[in-house]
Structure formats: structure tokens, C-alpha cells
Image (spheres, coloured by chain):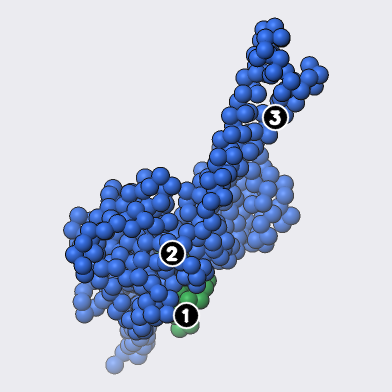
Amino acid sequence: MNKDILIIGGGIAGMQASLDLGDMGLQVHLVEKLTCIGGKMAQLDKTFPTNDCAI
Amino acid sequence: MVEKVTGSKGDFTVIVRKKARYVNEDLCTGCGACAEKCPTTVPDDYEMGLGNRKAIYRHYAQGIPSVFCIDPDYCRTFQGKKCGVCQKICQAKAIDYKQEDKVLELKVGAIILATGYDLFDATRISEYGYGRLANVVNSMEFERLSSASGPTEGHVKRPSDLRDHNLIKTKEKSLKKSTRTLAKYEKKHKMSTADFYKQFTAGNISDGDEFEKWVKQYENVREATRKLEELKARAEKFDIATRLAFIQCVGSRDFRFNKYCSSYCCMHSIKEAMMAKDHDARTEAYIFNMDLRTVGKGFEEYKVRGAEKLGLHYVRGRVAEITQDENENPIIWYEETTSQEVKSLTVDLAVLAVACEAPRGIEKVAELVGVALDHNRFFKTAPLNPLDTTVPGIFVCGCAQGPVDIPESVAQASSAASRAAEVIWQSTIEYGESHWKKKNPE
């Protein structure tokens, strides 16, 4: 029985899931193919509804 | 990169290949001196190819981990040329050309697939001219053009003008070089080029190889200068794109490509139009749609605000074709369904709201972890278990299971996290119980 969790993909969904599991006290391995996490959302300038910067 | 997954719910063994960065992560401070000095320039994927990066790079400035990485496909050292500039300049001594991939074996209880999506390749719809017409861009490219940290520093410049500016730069450079050669001739023969040319054409100077070369060079310079002036005059005429057309449902709700609705593009285009209007009040934005699907908390109000406060034009009608005029302005041909007329509209820039597609390579991931895909190539889920894949203990969230917007992606991620934690804790309880029973037989 293993307690760790693997997440494939470091975009907004992968990051949110990692943070939630981390808050629960579980160890997470986050695998991302690019050099940085952030995914497509990091490319977005500003986001709904406040039109604030995405990063 | 995940290479192999074995085992079942509660007990997976995963082989992960950690790719070499060729930069020591513990030593790199992220100062960026290496990228400043790197001689190799590469089109930047993050800027959708509209800007450039170096062969040693960070995906984006605020990226985490804040560590640089060498791209071996472009780096001069890896291509067998003499370089090593980054190694010399790095004060932290973090550059390590000999770093190798690491293969890790992870023991995990649950897996979450959050592999996201890819943008629809708009070159597949030839009548929209993406890739053929300079000033037709996709929604993500427009996002970078309007971003303050993007290649144009937030001024919505047209790709054709960016191309012209680059052309002016390279032409100026080569002109400078040719003028230097002329100066050499002048020095050698102690005569100004203009004088020489007058005398040569008058026939006062006899033929000679070098004189002919001189004449040719002079004529080339004159021609290049004239072309440069023309280009500059054209570039000066244009400032930033203020007439924008947003074309919805490019590759989605289209029976030739994807039948599904990509769900977020309506809001995305409204937002992009709003940002452009905020940046420059002269902006006139037209959103060509079949219907604006603004379903979600606060979405409809956002759409109405766009029309009433910012004066965005929502045009109902599907665009048939995009052509361009002699100034490379896109012309949008469409049927206005409210008046039942076929019309055209000339704009500065056309933005295609491209569909959200399952990422290229999703089949490989599915095969690796053993889960099934649905008919749209996203990970298969059941209506009442929307985040469970076909394999127990493996969950999915975000666009990997189908097109969703950011708020829903985040909600699904939290939900998938809870489902994964359930697996871990349930098996912990089961393990505890069996352990207790073993210790205390009845």
C-alpha cells in the first residue's frame, strides 16, 4: 500500500490538485514535460471576471 | 516523462524519466546572465513563435522552478560547435553539459491525469487563411500580442508589421555593410563614389574588374536604400490594430472536425476584445458567432457589460471566408443572419477562436496507464463519476476529460484530489484493520 500520489501534467488543474493534496498532508509527485509548471494558463494575459493578470 | 505504469489501485509502480536540464538545479540562481550572452536565438513557443528566446532559457520569466535549461536541439555546444559561453559567464558554476537523464521509480497509491489540451490547428480550415494570410492569428497568439509581458509589450501590433520591422532591421544592417565596402573603394582610389559613378557612366574611366565591382556595389546600395525607404514609409503608416474581428467556433461545432462545443472560447473572445478596448479606446471589436454561449456564474453579465459599456459588436453569422486587401488587411466574408444579407468587413486583425482538442500524444498516455479514451479522444469518464477513468485509482481533471474553462478546471482538480485522497485513506484504514486483526486474532 502506497501513500504517495502521482499527477501527470502541471497546468492549472494539475497544480490545484497538487496543492489540495499537499494541504491534506499527502506526498505528491508532479510530472511536467516542460521546464516550468503553469501550462496554458500562464500564457493568458488576464482572466475573467476581474481582468486581472493570470500569473 | 512517465515511461511505465504497473500495478493497481493503492499500489502503482511508476517509472519516470527526469530529463536533464544541463543546468544544476541546486546551484542555478536564475539570474539570467547566461541567456543574455547566449549567441543562439530560437523562436519562442511560449510567445507562440511571435518572439524569440535563447538556446538556454526559462519557459517564461515567472516560471517555477526558477532554473534555466539548455535546449540541446539548438545549443551550439550540443551541435558540435565551439561555444561554452554560458559556462564561462555563470558565476554559480551551474552549467553542466554532461548532466544525464535520471530514471526514478515511484510507488504511488493513486494517479491523477491532468494532461490538458492542445489548440486546434487552424491551417486545416484553408478558407480562413491561417498561416497563409499574415494578419490572421489564433486566440492564443492574440493573447501574447496583447500581453504586457509579450513580444509587443501589450501593443496589439499586426504580425505583418512585426515582420516588416524585422525586415527593416536586417536590411539596415546589410546596407551598413555595403556602405562600408564603398568607403573602402573610395579610400583606395581617393575619389567619392558619386564622382566616380558620374565619370564612369560618362566613359571617362576605362574598364576594369574592380571598377565594375564598384559600380555594381553602388547600384545595389542605391536600390536597397530605395526599397528600405519604401518599407519604412509603409511601416510608419501603421500603428496598432484597432479594428478587430473575432471568429468563433474555428474547428469546434463543425462536422468536418470536432462536433463538440469547446465551451470557453465565447468568454475568451469577449475577454480579449475587452482587453483590447481597455488598452486603446479607439478599438472596434466584432465577434462573429453562431450564438454566444456564456453559461456560468457571472458570464452573461460579463457579456452584457462588454456590449453596453465597452461597445463590443456581437455579429450573428458564421464566417465563410477570409481574404485580404493590398495592405494585408483581412476581409471577413459572412452572412448576417439577422438581416439575411451576405456582407464583408475589412479589419486590421482577424482572431480565430480555435477549438480545444485532446492533446497530441494522449493515445500514448492512455496506453501507458491503461485507460480508455472517448470518441473525441479525451479520457473516458462516466456521467455519474465524472472524474473517474476506466481504471480504479486513476482520476482525471481539467481539459484532459473534455473542454472546460478555468473555474471548472480548478473545481475538478480539487474534486479529483479528494477522490485520490479517498483511495489513500481508505486503503490506510483497510491496512490498519487487517494489521490489527493479524495482531489480535479472535
Q: Which residue is mark 3?
A: B179
Choose mark 1 or mark 3, whichever is in front. 3
Q: Are marks 1 and 3 in contact (CB under 8 Å)?
A: no
Q: Are marks 2 and 1 in contact (CB under 8 Å)?
A: no
Q: Which residue is mark 1?
A: A50
Q: Residues within 10 Å of mark 1 (few under 14, many from 20)?
A: few
Chain that bears disc 3:
B
Q: Are marks 2 and 1 on the same chain?
A: yes
The numbered mark, 2 or 1, whose residue comes first in the sequence reads 2
A3 left or right, relative to B31: left
Residue B215 lies, in percent from the top left, at: 65, 18
Residue at the location (61% across, 34% down)? B225
Chain that bears disc 1:
A
Amino acid type at mark 2: Lys
Chain that bears disc 2:
A
Residue at the location (21% across, 67% down)? B339
Q: Are marks 1 and 3 on the same chain?
A: no
Q: Secondary structure at mark 2?
A: helix
Q: Quadrant of residue B396?
A: bottom left
Q: Is residue B432 above or below residue B344?
A: below
Which residue occupies the foreground of this view, B415 or B42? Answer: B42
Choose mark 2 or mark 1, whichever is in front. 1
Q: Quadrant of residue B106?
A: bottom left
Q: Which colour is chain B painted?
A: blue
Quarter of the image with the C terminus of chain B in it: bottom left
- Disc number at residue A40? 2
Q: Is residue B180 above or below residue B264?
A: above
Q: Which colour is chain A painted?
A: green
Q: How far apart in space, not on screen, are marks 1 and 3 (Cα)?
A: 54 Å
